[in-house]
Amino acid sequence: MSKVQHSVIEGTFDARQLAFSVKAQAERVVNKGADVSDQYLFRASVGIPDQPPLDWLNCVADEMRFYGSARGKKQAIEIGGIGIAYEHVWHQPTPFATIFEALRASLQSASKGLRFYGGFRFSQVAMPDADWQIFGFSRFIVPRLEMIRAGRGNLFSLHFTAAEYADGDVDDWCDRIASMCFWCDAWSDQFPPPLSRQENPDYSGWEENIEESLKAFASEQLDKVVLARRADFLFSGNLDPIVLLHRLKSATPDCFHFCYMPKKDIAFVGASPERLYYREDRQIETEAVAGTRMRGKTPEQDAQLGDDMLNSDKDRREHEIVRAGIREQLSPLCEVFEMDSSPRLQKLARGQHLYSHITGTLRSAVQDEDVLAALHPTAALGGQPRDTALALIEKLEAFDRGWYAAPVGWVAEDAAEFAVAIRSGLVQPDKLSLFSGAGIVAGSTAHNEWEEIELKIRDFIKVLTAS
């Protein structure tokens, strides 16, 4: 990653001091950036003492907000954002190459260290329904204000164009920073209880979908299909996506957490255990995750459940299909490709999965759009063969997946990371739609796969019903 020089505020600080430092840093970066276009994106960054970005976002509930955090220690990072300094939105099906070319062009005309945050629809061809329309086919933003927490300190940044600086907008934003609250003494316990729950499909419809899938295995060259369900919850009042995410984050350690908010009262929120890929220069890291069990109530029961999954023919076949799909799609893009020789257990707070780690060195001409086209959707989210499975999903699912099970993450000049947006929900003012899926292979039963999805959304359910 590029080294970025920035001012540092030592110890405690007040918002007025931060605003003064940001304004001074903005003047410095602009003075260094002579002869740039009006749309050149500047980044004025100031180091500040450590604090959780979610606390800051909770203090500004009247703003459009963004949050993302990585899983694990190696790439441990949290990002909070307010407002939009720059965005790319595509409302029609658009090739990955076109999207990444636009992002690269913007990054090449921007300060070092800047990132775009966003994602895609699951379907590369179907238009969104009314609930998902505002998210677009793909949407990437640079927040106006950004707080990054990595290690023991935070980096606070203001993003602005050369034209905005000339118009005096930076002064206006620094005035807003000076009056902002940054620390949250306590999180609100007020959370409207759910009034109703509606399934799509209901259990009888789910049984029909499983039966149709099993017929397809027998009559077509289909090894696996991943079918999803949507559960809609109605509430007596409006939901705050950041409060929902805060509760979810506490219940789901070791996950990617995200909140994409295209409008103040609409958000896509989730806690995904699965990385699609992480790239730094030409080094890439990805994983195969398939097969699910609950965690045991005792160490002995937990070990037994894990051993059962490791020795389950059905789960091992499901997992091997995902491994084979990634090997087939990604290895041609790599000079070096390495995969765990056999799956191991990935243990989460309330569930465990079969997991295989994969690393590689990309060929020199390979770009992010090539990697994304190769990996999305993996057999863990779509099925195998991919096109046959996607056609069956389109036929059987009577709802729009939207951004569920699609890539969400960030893109920088020399790196990118995307998670798979599973264990996720669409927040609307008084409604939450939860999405989750199960891998269907020969031998699957409607009851077991229904219960597997219930296990996967259990963290959300506990959050919704907690007092």
Image: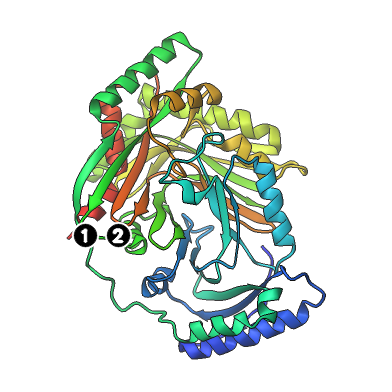
Kindly identify which residue carries mark 1: 192
Residue at 61% of width from left, 86% of height from top?
23
Give the quadrant of residue 445: top left
Q: Secondary structure at mark 2?
A: loop
Q: Which residue is mark 2?
A: 239
Residue 70 higher or lower than 450, as above or below:
below
* Residue 407 placement (x, y as % from top left): 52, 45
Depth check: give the residue in front, 22 or 291. 22
Q: Is residue 336 above or below residue 62?
A: above
Q: Which amino acid type is shown beneath numbered disc 1?
A: Pro
Q: Is residue 29 visible?
A: yes
Toward the right, the furthest residue is 35
Q: Is residue 25 above or below residue 325?
A: below
**436 relative position to 407: left or right:** left
- Crowd around label 2: few <14 · some 14–19 · many ≥20 (10 Å): many
Identified by mark 2, the residue type is Leu
| Quadrant into which the C terminus falls | bottom left
> How dense is the environment of label 1, judged by Cα within 10 Å: few (below 14), some, or many (20 and up)?
some
From this viewpoint, which residue is outermost toward the top?
219
Assess whether mark 2 and mark 1 are in contact (beta carbons under 8 angstroms): yes
- Dot 1 falls on a residue whose secondary structure is loop
